[in-house]
Amino acid sequence: MTGSQLIGFRGFIEGLVHDGEVARGSSVDRRFAAASVQATTATVDECDNVKDPGHLFESKSGRQLAAWGTLGASSVEITMQQEGGTWKVADTVSKAVACS
């Protein structure tokens, strides 16, 4: 990750640590398709189908607190930047029309 994606992810992790929580990811079927590549920038279309949301847990007791995420299909456009020979997620934008 890079840019705003990295800043957002670090904020998410810092919030979990501050609140004494941990997160378990969701069950998601993902499909990717490269939309375009221009020099060091690429656009990728991602099709998600969330079958089970992620969950937050209290880190000390392991008690489940809440679910997070949205069930069902969604579509995201991902912008990637190549930095030092490695492709990194720079931005994501939800699309209005979910893929099937």
Image: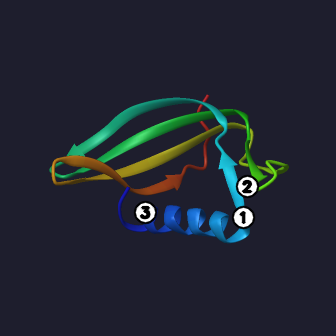
Q: In the image shown, does 81 or 64 lie closer to the viewer? A: 64
Dot placed on the residue nearer the N-terminal end, 2 or 3: 3
Which numbered disc covers residue 20? 1
State which quadrant residue 24 falls in: top right
Query: Label 2 crowding class (10 Å Cα cut-off): few <14, some 14-19, many 20+?
Result: some
State which quadrant residue 97 falls in: top right
Vertical comparison of 28 with 19: above or below: above
Vertical comparison of 85 with 91: above or below: above
Q: Secondary structure at mark 3?
A: helix
**Residue drawn 75% across the image and 51% down it:** 56
State which quadrant residue 17 falls in: bottom right
Q: CA distance from mark 1 to mark 3?
A: 21 Å
From the image, state whether disc 2 or disc 3 is nearer to you.
2
Query: Label 1 crowding class (10 Å Cα cut-off): few <14, some 14-19, many 20+?
Result: few
Q: As drawn, is 3 to the left or to the right of 48?
A: left
> Badges 1 and 3: C-beta atoms under 8 Å apart?
no
Which amino acid does the dot numbered 2 rest on? Answer: Ser
Which amino acid does the dot numbered 3 rest on? Answer: Leu
> Which residue does the numbered mark 2 point to in the structure image?
59
> Percent from the top left, x then y, of residue 48?
58, 35
Q: CA distance from mark 2 to mark 1?
A: 6 Å
Dot placed on the residue nearer the N-terminal end, 1 or 3: 3
> Percent from the top left, x then y, of residue 69?
71, 48
> Percent from the top left, x then y, of residue 93?
50, 55
Dot placed on the residue nearer the N-terminal end, 2 or 1: 1
**Residue drawn 59% across the image and 64% down it:** 12
Which amino acid does the dot numbered 1 rest on? Answer: Gly
> Badges 2 and 1: C-beta atoms under 8 Å apart?
yes
From the image, state whether disc 1 or disc 3 is nearer to you.
1
Vertical comparison of 38 with 7: above or below: above
**Residue drawn 38% across the image and 55% down it:** 1
Q: In the image shown, does 61 or 80 lie closer to the viewer? A: 61
